[in-house]
Image (cartoon, rainbow, N blue to C red):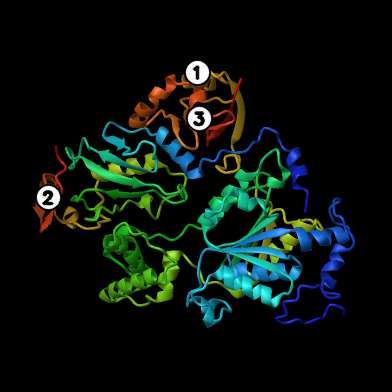
Amino acid sequence: MAASHAVNGNASSADWEGRYYHVDQILDRPGPRTDPSFLAGDEVKDFLRNKCKILVIGAGGLGCEILANLALSGFKDIHASDAYVIYNQMLLRSGIRPKDVGKSKAIVAAEFIMNRVPGVKVTPYFGKIQDKDEEYYMQFNLVICGLDSVEARRWINATLVNMVDPENPESLKPLIDGGTEGFKGQARVILPTVTSCYECSLDMLNKPTAFPICTIANTPRLPEHCIEWASVLEWPRVHGDKKMDTDNPEHIQWLYEIALRRAQEFKIEGVTYSLTQGVVKNIIPAIASTNAIIAASCCNEAFKIATSSAAYLNNYFMLIGTDGVYSYTFEHEKREDCPVCGGEALDITIGKDWTVDRLIEMLVERQDIQIKKPSLSTPGKHIFFQAPPQLEEATRPNLEKKVSELVPDGGEITVTATTLPFSLSLRVKYN
Amino acid sequence: MIKIWSMKKNEDQASKKKPKTSAAQIRVQKDLTELDLPSTMKTHFPDPADLLNFTLTITPDEGMYKGGSFVFQFNINSNYPHEPPKVKCTQVIYHPNVDLEGNVCLNILREDWKPVLNLNSVMVGLQYLFLEPNADDPLNKEELKRNREQFIYNVKTSMRGGTIKGVQYNKVTP
């Protein structure tokens, strides 16, 4: 076996003889199911190891596993992004060393991988993904998410869908989304605007448990009721407009103490720090083996997409490990009325002197749109709203204005109306 | 890299890029411009350019709260409609389903919220609380169940800005 070199903590960047012996079995020759565009041999290896740039969002339990897998499969230019620092409680969940507490997750993970896997460059980014613009995301070939937040996923999904420019093939960035919740997990491949996107499947999410506010306020029976009381009622009462940060240990500590006092008052047992964190962040304890399976699946897809060496997942893999091991793969379909990737966009060409009123008249008359009482806006301002009365009045003067004064050439108008299931966007050109 | 673009080419050419307006913004625009409110409810936008923060004034024309004018603050975040709007009563009012901090106990604002619901459903739900206060779900005020007459009397007192059991309520009548 030529590949059995054990190299520990050696940061030499040279690829030693036989380093990729096993991976090369896949890349050196096509197989029966490889894509016709697969170029076996040096070219694909060069792309994977020297050109492909991949972004991993989230460097927690799942993200770290993904980073390690990618590095070992031969990806060499990896970027790791995470907005948070390591807290004490995380020591139990992953193999983080006590000296790393308080440091950025992304930086610690990057250093660890670089030390452990020679020749791999991991560039950490310690900050929110929302702070980066399209230009930043354009530099990557692939994006993998190992996140625990629905909000961050929706954001990156919408950003990547919006980035797709019909004139530029490079603007389409495949997104591989991994997620775990206890013994359950999923991995999926999203090709923005081509396959169903994250937003299309939003109705598949489990609803976070919410308790009736009256129970919380009057008749708590569970430790969760006491924690909700602290976070939903006591926090805003005591702290006013100050926002609760569920990632700040001091805030969690405060909630824990308040909830504990409440629990003692009602003789309820079971309020702990980790339960408090679990309830306010809606966390289900992480299971290392679930993370390992999902990370492996994500990296397998990343490898196949980057090399075209085998057919990639189409498009949703779910793992249910609660009763035995069950997995299911299916094609999640695009939702026609998806607010991010669905809907229709129409190109319209109108005269420079057209008023908003005339544009609305035209929309109402068009047979292919079938619209009644449309309301119009651009990303920054309202053009005309049918209701409520105050906004109708405020936007009414715009009816007399020229569209070209309000919308630049090539600009977009969002149209909503009762007769439209979601929204319609118009791209306006002037002649 | 796989050639995704070739698959893209086969697609319907009509499907073009969507605008940069956020999903929440579009949904709020749709909800608001399709509001169909009775004359007993009015919205007010302190900043007409900001659709995500506004107030709703309810002036019930029947029931025990008739004659009052109740103001609710709506705050919608970028996760709407995945998350319900945050709704608070801006006044201290005597109502079994609204506490003194203005928190509202309405099922569709919390445990029964679904993205298919919209702002209209929330507003209609709020108005309903004034027509039929829910005695089974009391945040406070046990009186409604125990002694309806006394409760109605207390409502009238509170709406004039009176004090009940040491709590001073806001005047909500003209």
Q: Percent from the top left, x then y, of residue B21?
A: 51, 40
For disc 3, the chain is A
**Is disc 3 on the same chain as disc 2?**
no
**Nearer to us in this view, A179 or B121:** A179
For disc 2, the chain is B
Q: Percent from the top left, x then y, of residue A211?
A: 37, 60
Q: Amino acid at mark 3?
A: Thr
Asked if residue B91 shows in the view, the reply is yes
- Asked if residue A214 lies left or right of residue A406, the reply is left
Q: Residue at x 58, y 70 (%)?
A: A107
Q: Which residue is mark 2?
A: B154
- Asked if residue A290 lies left or right of residue B62, the reply is right
Classify mark 1: helix, strand or loop: helix
The quarter of the picture where residue A223 lies is bottom left
- Asked if residue A387 lies left or right of residue A349, the reply is left
Q: Which residue is mark 3?
A: A419
Q: Amino acid at mark 2?
A: Asn
The quarter of the picture where residue A270 lies is bottom left
Between the C-alphas of marks 2 and 3, the distance is 46 Å
The quarter of the picture where residue A214 lies is bottom left
Image position of A71 with respect to A156: above or below: below
**Nearer to us in this view, B105 or A108:** A108
Q: Residue at x 28, y 56 (%)?
A: B137
Quadrant of the image containing the C terminus of chain A: top right
Q: Which residue is mark 1?
A: A358
Q: Percent from the top left, x then y, of residue A30?
A: 89, 59
Q: Percent from the top left, x then y, of residue A417?
A: 48, 30
Q: Amino acid at mark 1?
A: Arg
